Image (cartoon, rainbow, N blue to C red):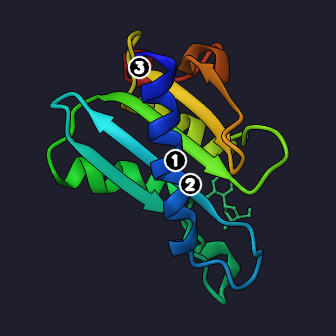
Amino acid sequence: MDEKEILSYIDEVNLLLKRAYVPYSKFPVAALLIDNNGKKHKGVNVENASFGLTLCAERNAITTAVTQGMKKIRLLIVTGNTLEPISPCGACRQVIREFSDKDTVIILANRDGKYKIASIEELLPYSFGAEDL
Ligand code: THU
């Protein structure tokens, strides 16, 4: 994947930030993923007056993708209104891990197009997975 392609995905996911439902935190997050079939899926964070029911953007994108037949994440891009590239929460890292393999590329970005590329192993080292059961 070249720089131009990365930046165009980041532009696309940044456009999605306006759909985030964030009346409480005012902290929009958006995620875009490409699955093992090359299909694109999107998610935003959706908050609730009962705060604990808040859904993170990454997990929304992943559950939507699974509903549409995704087996593995090929590429996941997450963005937020942060100074530095956003850092996914621990719960999302574990869920990303469930649908990642060694080829999964994760791009953490921000509203200004600043980004960093990471693997799931870097985001969640020594993690728990199906093979541990
Ligand atoms: N949030 C996400 O959507 N993803 C993350 O990885 C970090 C946190 C959301 C949850 C909540 O709506 C807001 O950001 C502030 O925590």
Question: Is 19 placed above or below 38 here?
Answer: below
Which picture quadrant has residue 85? top right
Secondary structure under tag 3 reads loop
Return the mark for residue 14: 2
Question: Is 84 placed above or below 79 here?
Answer: above
Q: Residue at x 52, y 34 (%)?
A: 7
Question: Is 93 placed above or below 25 here?
Answer: above
* C-alpha separation, residue under disc 3 versus residue under disc 2: 21 Å
Ligand 1, by image quadrant, is bottom right
Q: If you read the primary sequence from the N terminus, does the residue marked by circle 3 or circle 2 appear first?
A: 2
How many tags in the picture?
A: 3
* Extreme residue toward the bottom, this view: 49
Q: Position of residue 32 (x, y in %)?
A: 42, 47
- The answer to whether residue 13 is left or right of residue 50 is left
- Residue type highlighted by circle 3: Thr
In this figure, which residue is indicated by the disc labeled 3? 104
Q: Is mark 3 within 8 Å of ligand 1?
A: no
Secondary structure under tag 2 reads helix
- Residue type highlighted by circle 2: Asn
- Residue type highlighted by circle 1: Asp
The C terminus sits in image quarter: top left
Return the mark for residue 11: 1
Question: Is 111 placed above or below 2 here?
Answer: below
Specify few, some or many for label 1: CA neighbours under 10 Å numbering under 14, 14-19, or 20 or more: some
Q: Residue at x 54, y 23 (%)?
A: 128
